[in-house]
Amino acid sequence: MTQKDTTQTPTTHTATPRTETTSPANTAVLVTGGSGKTGRRTVARLRELGVETRAASRSGETPFDWADRTTWQAALDKVDAVYIVPLDTSPSPTPAFVEQAVASGVRRLVLLSARGVDVPGYFGPSYEGGGPHMESEAAVRASGVAWTILRPGWFAQNFSEGFFLDGVRSGELALPTGSGTAAFVDADDIAAVAVAALTEDGHNGEVYELSGPRALGIADVLDEIAKATGVRATYVPVPEPAFRAGLVAQGLPEEEAALWTDAMKPIRTSQEAPVTDGVHRALGRPPRDITDFVRTASEAGAWS
């Protein structure tokens, strides 16, 4: 969903790749979460480039289940690089997966992390700046192979295929985000950076903080959608307790409802507002604007 304080230039890191060579037979790229927002876009871009790509998920073409380690080895066979979309559970299975990947001959790891994961309090008062994302980051940093970490903020696609979609379609989007803003990042940009890191030199040891080119409030994004499509939804600010209670009333477990409510804090406090340079550093171009996202999503029938 969301990600580090970005008022300063993101820190880069230097990793030490393994010196041993891997058999030329290791040529495939594995994409975990291959049917997800960034995963399926990454798979599509890799295949457009002619890269042998495995889209891995529990029900996908390459069976892969984070909770079932017996599925990992077949997915990793003859794989040279992996795009890791980790589980947001603790303890994280990513360290064990990374160890197995490296033992299988994988030479490059690209991890989808999140903006703000190393900032205590970023996702609510109980967040201490650790958890599964930081466990995953530590694992790839210590892997001994080339690695790149992506830290995107809130996805623009939450309005077209995610958590906000039902509200947009119903005409009323009620959220505990007040007048806060966020530089929503397009998942197409995340995928483009992932593909670059998976297939090109020059990204080893980089931590890319990814955002869109400008900060907008929820109402601003809804206005953009309305101008492009005629589909008009009203933004309704609601208090956190009412939002959490509403999620529970819809059938969400208390713990999950609390997590979603806390996840809104970076928007409410405008911690997601700073524009970062990760897309430009990785791709040499500006990030896609919200108008680009709206046009693409509208053409795909997101709000029809």
Image (spheres, rainbow, N blue to C red):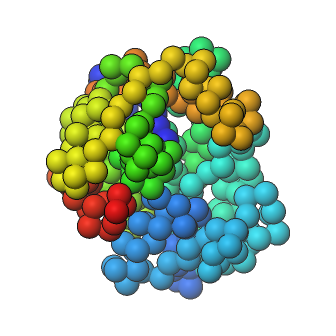
Q: Residue at x 56, y 73 (%)?
A: 55
Q: Residue at x 31, y 60 (%)?
A: 297
**In this picture, residue 176 sits left or right of residue 179:** right
The mark tally for this picture is 0
Question: Which residue is drawn at the image coordinates 37% and 84% (left, top)?
Answer: 50
Relative to 184, say whether 34 is above or below: below
Tell me if residue 128 comes above or below residue 231 in the rendering.
above
Q: Is any atom of residue 148 visible in this view? A: no
Where does the image place residue 285, in percent across and percent down from the top left?
Answer: 17, 52
Percent coordinates x, y for residue 241 in the rendering: 60, 18
- Residue at 41% across / 66% down in the picture? 41
Nearer to us in this view, 59 or 227: 227
Position in image of residue 133 (x %, y %): 60, 39
Q: Please name whichever residue, 155 or 245, is drawn nearer the observer in this view of the structure.
A: 245
Quarter of the figure with the C terminus: bottom left
Q: Is residue 297 visible?
A: yes
Where does the image place residue 198, in percent across and percent down from the top left?
42, 64
